[in-house]
Image (cartoon, rainbow, N blue to C red):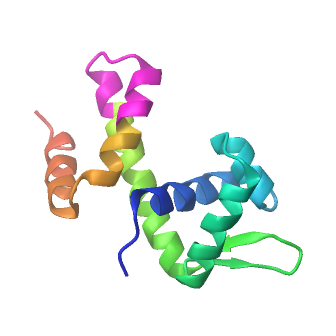
């Protein structure tokens, strides 16, 4: 199932928050992304319906296997692009913002080729 960049961003945020918080709730996502809670609730419903997250009765959000796979792919892209741009001399804040844009539009094929090229010893 195809997921849009907004959905990818939510999944990546859930992954990041799950690394630093004992549980992830909609309010945590809203705070992290500086979004309104109703917007996050709508997005969580879509991600739950598409099978990318599970929401417990207490409101705790967990990634399913498909959600983890997408989140990890996007997060790997983010880390690679932001660190690569910083090594090229781009301000860290700008590098992170640009990486966030690039990570959602690049094809898997192009990403793998860039990753392979960046990791080549010269």
Q: Tell me which secondary structure the magenta stretch mostly adopts.
A: helix
Towards the viewer: 101 or 73: 101
Q: Is residue 21 visible?
A: no
Q: Relative to 52, is 98 above or below? A: above
Quarter assignment of residue 53? bottom right
Q: Position of residue 71 (x, y in %)?
A: 49, 63
Q: What span is in magenta?
A: 84-98
Residue occupying image coordinates x 71% and y 47%: 36
Q: Position of residue 54 (x, y in %)?
A: 68, 80
The x and y percentages for residue 103 are 34, 49
Q: How many marks?
A: 0
The quarter of the picture where the N terminus appears is bottom left
Residue 60 makes an appearance in the image? yes
Foreground of the two, 22 or 25: 25
Q: Is residue 103 magenta?
A: no
Above-or-below relation of 54 to 41: below
Apparent side of residue 89 relative to residue 32 in the rendered image (left or right) = left
Residue occupying the point 71% across, 49% down: 30
At 40% from the left edge and 16% from the top edge, which residue is drawn? 91
- 96 in the magenta segment: yes
Where 20 sits versus 44, above or below? Answer: above
On the rendered image, what quadrant is the C terminus found in?
A: top left
- Image point (52%, 71%), residue name: 68
Side (left or right) of 91 relative to 102: right
Q: Residue furthest left?
A: 122
Residue reaching furthest to the right: 58
Query: Residue 22 lies in what quarter of the image?
Result: bottom right
- Whole-percent x, y for residue 100 in the image: 41, 41
Direction from residue 111 to residue 35 in the image, left or right: right
């Amino acid at each position: 199932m195809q997921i849009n960049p907004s959905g990818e961003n939510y999944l990546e945020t859930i992954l990041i928050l799950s690394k630093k918080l004992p549980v992830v709730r909609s309010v945590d996502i809203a705070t992290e992304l500086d979004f309104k809670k109703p917007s996050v609730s709508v997005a969580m419903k879509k991600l739950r319906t598409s099978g990318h997250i599970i929401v417990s009765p207490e409101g705790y959000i967990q990634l399913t296997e498909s959600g983890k796979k997408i989140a990890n792919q996007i997060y790997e892209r983010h880390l690679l692009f932001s660190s690569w741009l910083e090594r090229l001399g781009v301000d860290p804040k700008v590098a992170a913002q640009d990486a966030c844009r690039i990570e959602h539009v690049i094809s898997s094929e192009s990403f793998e080729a860039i990753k392979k090229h960046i990791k080549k010893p010269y």
